[in-house]
Image (spheres, rainbow, N blue to C red):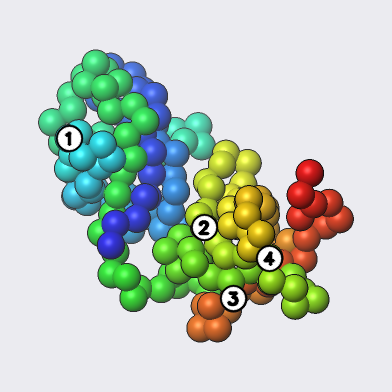
Amino acid sequence: MELVVARIGRAHGIRGEVSVEVRTDEPERRLAPGSVLATDPPAVGPLTIESGRVHSGRLLLRFVGVGDRTAAEALRNTLLLAEVDPDEQPEDPEEFYDHQLVGLTVVTAEGDTVGTVGEIAHLPAQDLLVVAREGGGEAFVPFVAEFVPEIDIDARRVVIAPPPGLLDED
């Protein structure tokens, strides 16, 4: 199974480095030199990481065969995908892969069924659970402990504690 681990941003400098938006909690493992990553769009890759470094709080990567700014800029907005065993679990019990959450039933702390997790939206500020509601439509639940206090993968259930108005149809 392929998981998105980063999105390539702007070129940095003139020697082929790019900034990346990290989308994994294990960048030292998934984005290490020598890693071969599939891409979306597929025609761009696969890409092999030659080197990486942190500069001003941003991860910069250089890929084998990408030697100048023009080639680096052509990679902008490409998603980097790592092959992961579908049964693999993150080391931290409070972390989850997207594929583990999609399809889980979403209920309120009171036990009312809201719907099912349709996808996880990875936004700059925070992640959102996109919940396909039982009666149609979607609800967007910030994926933070305050609003999502319990996830039980084995029971296929997500418990949410929405603030007033979050689940209103309007």
2 or 3: tag closer to the N-terminus:
2
Residue picked out by circle 1? 43
Find the distance from the CA under tag 1 to the CA under tag 2. 27 Å
Report if residue 55 is visible in the image: yes
- Residue 52: x %, y % from top left: 31, 40
User: Is disc 1 in contact with disc 2, using a CB cutoff of under 8 Å?
Assistant: no
Residue picked out by circle 4? 114
3 or 4: tag closer to the N-terminus:
4
Residue kind at label 4, given as amino acid type: Val
Residue shown at the point (25%, 42%) measured from the top left: 39
- Residue 20: x %, y % from top left: 40, 36
Secondary element under disc 3, as helix, strand or loop, is strand
The quarter holding residue 131 reads bottom right
The residue most toward the right is: 164
1 or 2: tag closer to the N-terminus:
1
Q: Is 169 or 29 nearer to us in this picture? A: 169
Which numbered dot is residue 118? 2
Residue kind at label 1, given as amino acid type: Ala
Which numbered dot is residue 69? none
